[in-house]
Amino acid sequence: MNPHNQSIDELKQTAAQVRRDIVRMVHGVNSGHPGGSLGCTDYFVSLYFRLMNYSTDFTMEGKGEDLFFLSNGHISPVWYSVLARAGFFDVKELSTFRKLNSRLQGHPTTHEGLPGVRIASGSLGQGLSVAIGAAQAKKINKDKGLVYVLMGDGELEEGQVWEASMYAPHHKVDNLIATVDRNGQQIDGSTEEVMSLGDLRAKFEAFGWHVLEADGNNFELLLPAFEEAISATGKGKPVIILMDTEMGFGVDFMMGSHKWHGVAPNDEQLEIALQQLAVKVAADY
């Protein structure tokens, strides 16, 4: 059972607080990836505060729970914030982001035992394969939990993604909901300039996936897409959501530009960002 189940208004407030955490975390060490983190905030908040069934009494096996895997691990700030706000660990630990001996490394790791994290990630292209394996393990164990995985669109340039994309439909891995963050940006420019992705819907449908599309920065549109995805599980096909987001969403000077893929705001920019990310009652760490 989800311990939160927030209303849309509550989700919006949580998302604003998470975005405040993101800009403060990367500013605090002048390092990190704010652009994709801000763009995917509503996705993470939807999962952990409304949709996924999980316990904050964390185990690696996650028996009877839904599991989440982050493939594009560089957007760790949003995941760390959401895990802390959801109750996996103390929110104050966010202040250790990317510091020596911190559990909150720039890319998620497992050797320090951070609750909520089941694989080290950030070496792109691997998350879908791991998620498929976890989903198959659940089927073998007759575990009704679902498996979620998030990938970046630039990440689809990795060949391993397409091997996994063939494998999942062939083996009827129908307890899996994958999502592509389709923000059109990657570290060196737009995906169209670096390596055009073509018609992703047609590609995944040709491989045998059940394909949905969604606006990832609008809860009123994202939640119904998620609910449709959940209802499509168990019917013989893996499910994928092509989720349109805007890099840097919520902070006007970051929005839509690949330049904020991995750059931290300075002091003045941080204050502007925090003014734009107003919440009814700020609960900054």
Image: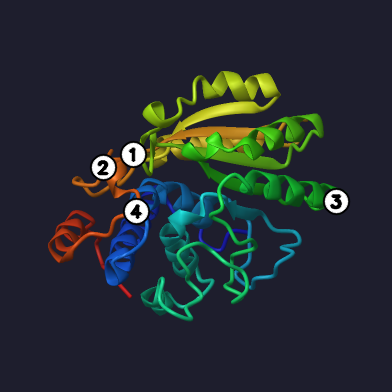
Type of amino acid at the residue the image marks with label 4: Gly
Mark 1 vs mark 2, CA separation in Å: 6 Å
Which quadrant of the rendered structure holds the N terminus? bottom right
* Residue 28 percent coordinates (x, y): 29, 71
Query: Is there CB contact under 8 Å for labels 3 and 2?
Result: no
Query: Is there CB contact under 8 Å for labels 2 and 4?
Result: no
**Secondary structure of residue under mark 4:** loop
Identity of the residue drawn at 56% across and 63% down: 3
Q: Residue 255 carries which label?
A: 2
Type of amino acid at the residue the image marks with label 2: Met
Would you name the residue on which mark 4 appears?
262
Q: Which of marks 2 and 4 is nearer the N terminus?
A: 2
**Secondary structure of residue under mark 2:** loop
Q: Nearer the viewer, mark 1 or mark 4?
A: 4
Would you name the residue on which mark 1 appears?
246
Type of amino acid at the residue the image marks with label 3: Lys
Would you name the residue on which mark 3 appears?
142
**Which residue occupies the foreground of this view, 275 or 163?**
163
Mark 3 vs mark 1, CA separation in Å: 38 Å
Q: Which of marks 4 and 3 is in front?
A: 4
Query: Is there CB contact under 8 Å for labels 1 and 2?
Result: yes
Q: Which of marks 3 and 2 is nearer the N terminus?
A: 3
Q: Which of marks 2 and 4 is in front?
A: 4
Indicate whether 283 appears above or below 76: below
Query: Is there CB contact under 8 Å for labels 4 and 3?
Result: no
